[in-house]
Amino acid sequence: MSSSAGLNEFDPHYEETFDNSHVYYEEMRRSCPVAHSEAFGGFWALFKYEDVLRVQTDSRTFSTAEKNVVPPATRNQGRRPPLHFDPPEHDKYRRPITPVFSKSRMLTLEPSLARYADELLTPLVEAGRFDFTLDFAEYFAARGFGLVLKLPQEMMWRSREVQVQYYRAQTAMDKPRIIEMSDRLYDIAREIVAQRKADPQDPKEDLVSALLFAGDSGEPIPEDEVVGSIRQFLSAAQAAPGAVLGSIAVHLARDHSLQERLRRNPDRIPDAVEEFLRLYAPYRVFARTAVEDTEIGGRLIPAGEPITMNFPSANRDAEVFVNPHEFDMDRTPNKHIAFGRGAHRCPAASLARLELRVALTALLSMTSSFELAGPVKMADWLEFGPSSTPLAVVSA
Ligand code: HEM
């Protein structure tokens, strides 16, 4: 067992393209699957499926109570539930959240979401050229969560704007700016909670009411923690779906026969979505901190050092997935971990799946073909996925 703290075996600072990270990660899985990086104040990075899964499912050893994201997020107003709490404390926050995102409840949002996709896409498709990420995906993801929270659109756009600034500050590790933007997200969360306190709703359907009035089986959650939780959701809800949607658009723009196949067989879109989630998992920033010195893959990880779980890499591990870089919607079982596993697995996976399915259905049905109309720009380390996806489309 050997320690490499201080070594720079992985460097996340490179110019990312749509394809180069997956080449880099494959090399890391082969040559250094548990790697130390000096970037962002120092962290460990796990590249193999088995190692990521182990850390995800052992919350006793690997805690989120301290460093749970790299670069470190500010906790200027305390820990934000549910992510910053370990089980069993974590259960108190997750219990009221889980039913709100049930698959059956999310399906009731489908007609509104589909209508919104049509409204947003119609003028873009008529124009023939647009930026799928900037003109569509980001608005669409914000709208999805806005529907769940029954929020006015204006508030979602406002939170999206602040969220983008918050992310930029985080990547630049600009602490004063991070705190300023985090405070602004807290202000929006506080506004939402105050509004819902004044007008409580059915806790089975409304996230804020569910947290505020945790119900018979749950302990009441203090109001400042409910605010922290909504603040957490405002960030989590908007980033990943937009990033994955952009990746899906790039993939399909490069593969016209797959576009055709899905247009002819829309019933296969859910399988396609699963395979896209496997290929284009967006997160590599989520982390855990070992509560004691621990060994992973023969390396000594000292207590207190953050360990990131590279989901895009784990999902292409050849030890788990045959032909890992190939799109194969007949892959069964498809054991991808884009939504994580264990206590902190994404509570909103049903919403995310619905958003991806509805958006993809709309794009395919409203066009007879589409292709890239310029260079794809990538977001940064915080999300794998495009920040700009120029498309040229032929309307159906
Ligand atoms: C394609 C879209 C999405 C992907 C790939 C994704 C992925 C993930 C992953 C991997 C985790 C686990 C983090 C960890 O273990 O540290 C997570 C947690 C979480 N996600 Fe998502 N997510 C998506 C969409 C969403 C949406 C739309 C929302 C909100 C409406 C959301 C809210 C959350 C929250 C609150 C947590 C923390 C849960 C906890 O700590 O118990 N996510 N997500």
Image: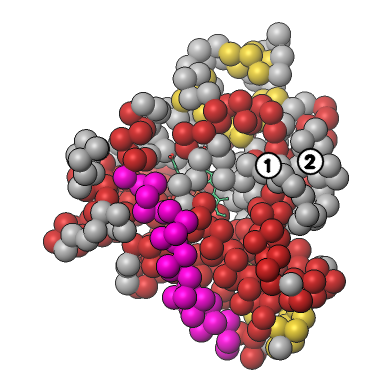
Q: Residue at x 42, y 67 (%)?
A: 108
Evaluate if marks 2 and 1 touch, with contact meaning CB atoms under 8 Å apart.
yes
Residue 120 is a magenta residue: yes
Q: Residue farthest to the bottom? A: 126
Q: Quadrant of residue 261?
A: bottom right
Q: Position of residue 244 (x, y in %)?
A: 62, 58
Near mark 2 (Cα within 10 A), the count class, few <14, some 14-19 or many ≥20, is some
Place residue 269 in its image quadrant: bottom right
Position of 382 compared to 78: left or right?
right
Residue found at the far top of this picture: 1
Give whichever of 257, 37 is nearer the camera: 257
Magenta residues span: 96-123
Q: Is residue 163 above or below residue 262?
A: above
Alpha carbon separation for disc pair 2 and 1: 8 Å
Q: Which residue is mark 1?
A: 335
Q: Main secondary structure of the magenta part?
A: helix
Does the rendering let one see residue 239? no
Q: Quadrant of the N terminus?
A: top right
| Residue at the left extreme of this rendering | 198
**Tag 2: amino acid:** Phe
Position of residue 179 relative to residue 53, above or below, is: below
Mark 1 surroundings: few (<14), some (14-19) or many (≥20) residues within 10 A: few
**Label 2 SS:** loop
Does the beta carbon of the residue at mark 2 sit less than 8 Å from ligand 1?
no
